[in-house]
Image (cartoon, rainbow, N blue to C red):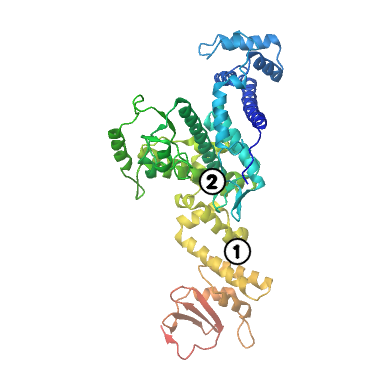
Amino acid sequence: MAKQKPGIDKISLRMEAIWSDAELRIMQDVVRRIKQYKKITSTADYQINRLIDLGKSTEEIERILKESLDATYSEMYELYDEVINWQYVRNAEIYEQINDRFLPPEENRWMIQISEAVKKQTSDELKNIAQSYGFSVMMGDKRVFTPFATYYQKYVDAAIMDLTSGGFDYNTVIRRVVTQMTNSGLRTVDYASGHSNRTPVAVRRAVLTGLSQVTGKISERNAALLGTDYYEVDWHAGARPTHRIWQGKVYTYQELETICGLGTVTGLHGANCYHDYYPFFPGISERNWSDDWLEEQNQKEAELKSWNGKEYDAYGRTQKQRQMETAMRAQREKISLLKEAGADPDEIVLHKAKYQAQLNEYSRFCQQMKLPEQRERIYYDMRGRIATNDKAQNAMFHPEMIKNASKDVAQYKRYREVLGNSLGSLAKFGQVKYNDSRAWEQLQKRVSTYREINTKNWSEEFKTKSKQAYDRFTKENIVMSVHALSRLPRLNKSGYVNIDERNVMQLLRNLPNYKESETRLAYFSEKLQLSIIRNVKTGDVVTIVRAKTPKGDWVNV
């Protein structure tokens, strides 16, 4: 059964509501700016002009501002007079001639053009303008949107309309939507394919794609009104190779679909596509990009540049840049979450240092690749300054530890579970690992010994005493095996002289006097009635045995 289209009246009312919401957001931002700066700023002036374009009367704008600012008429006159005298004011008449003239929606050609494009883009549904499949699942052969999709689509739709209205700039809108979603707990956007994107990536792609597709619908409507079936696709640097072959040329609408892939995810106006297309009139219009110029640019775009042992063409360089920006946004989020969770201050500083290193590498890459830095892509989260504040903080950690921050933090936590507070701080752990190979080897041995002790079927008291004994011997540069540690409490027995740990340490300070095998040396004391066996390769004390005479098969050394 064919899907029933909603009635024309309902569509008109819903479209009117969409525009009203966009006007309200612009008006609220104008009021916010005036309250903050105590004057009508350049941006606020621009936004007021956009409200006029949307059909608002100067009288209504003044009334809303007066009520929202709780201002007197004299204060409003003063506010307006300051703008009128400003040499860069866009349209002084807005503030000089206050009247009730407004432009009804049905007479506003600009609004009609955009409204028709949105209707066509959404098949008269007037929602999910980006046509995103975010937060959807497949049930059999039917796509079903989860409850989260409602919030996601609402945020993205508002962003697209705010950009379409001209009331807000692109970066402001993206930052606002990302903040709204993350504050709502939506940190990732999941798709039916099983793929998942972080919120900034998903939002930016959805808004950019949705806005491009609405622009495309406007071009198609204009082409139909002007009686042409031809379109020129624009050109931009760094296009993906599959788009590079068709950008900058003229096509019929059918060729936009068959050659450029219009309507597909990977084609023209698909995901992350920056291209647009505009009506073209053969014999009248002149192409913006000749075939010779396009061929020359394609050759330049295919040139390879090297970075850290890998080569990138123009598209590959921009993709590497996007990867770096994504990694930095993820690092900023990690730092914020660590702060919220009350994590170890050293861990926070380490991850800040890693973020600073990422920023430095990003700058070097952009400079070497001749790419402009786009840090606004990094700062969508509105979290402010994240990097470390001074050189002393950066110096707390070795460069390799900064590079391997997550891996080393995980290792530190594993070691801390075994050794407890005796392990020391994360910064100290890093200094040992990367600056003192001998101390690092000892630390690893200590952890492995503690772990082995933990596996034994011993009482907790005996385990604790064995670990303490291991540490005492380690201070004397003696490494005890777990078996040797288990022998310490049983040193004294009937018929033998009494001894203690100090006697064991004293004997081990001497040179070995026997060889038990090619891999084992023996320390024997007839006076102490004690023999100690040490592994030649590892230096570990293998066992401790009470004996009055050396073994018969030992070789005197």
Picture quadrant where residue 290 is located: top left
Residue 418, which numbered label? 1
Q: How far separated are the C-alphas under marks 1 and 2?
A: 30 Å
Q: Amino acid at mark 1?
A: Val
Q: Position of residue 65 (x, y in %)?
A: 67, 18
- Give the left or right position of residue 52, taking residue 430 as reference: right
Front-most of 172 and 196? 196
Residue 29: x and y, percent? 62, 25
136 lies above or below 541: above
Q: Quadrant of the C terminus?
A: bottom left
Q: Position of residue 295 (x, y in %)?
A: 29, 37
Residue topped by disc 2: 330
Vertical relation: 196 (above or below) 249? below
Check if mark 1's residue and mark 2's residue have beta carbons within 8 Å. no
Q: Residue furthest bottom?
A: 552
Query: Which sits in the foreground, 289 or 64?
Result: 289
Quarter assignment of residue 185:
top right
On residue 432, which mark appears?
A: none
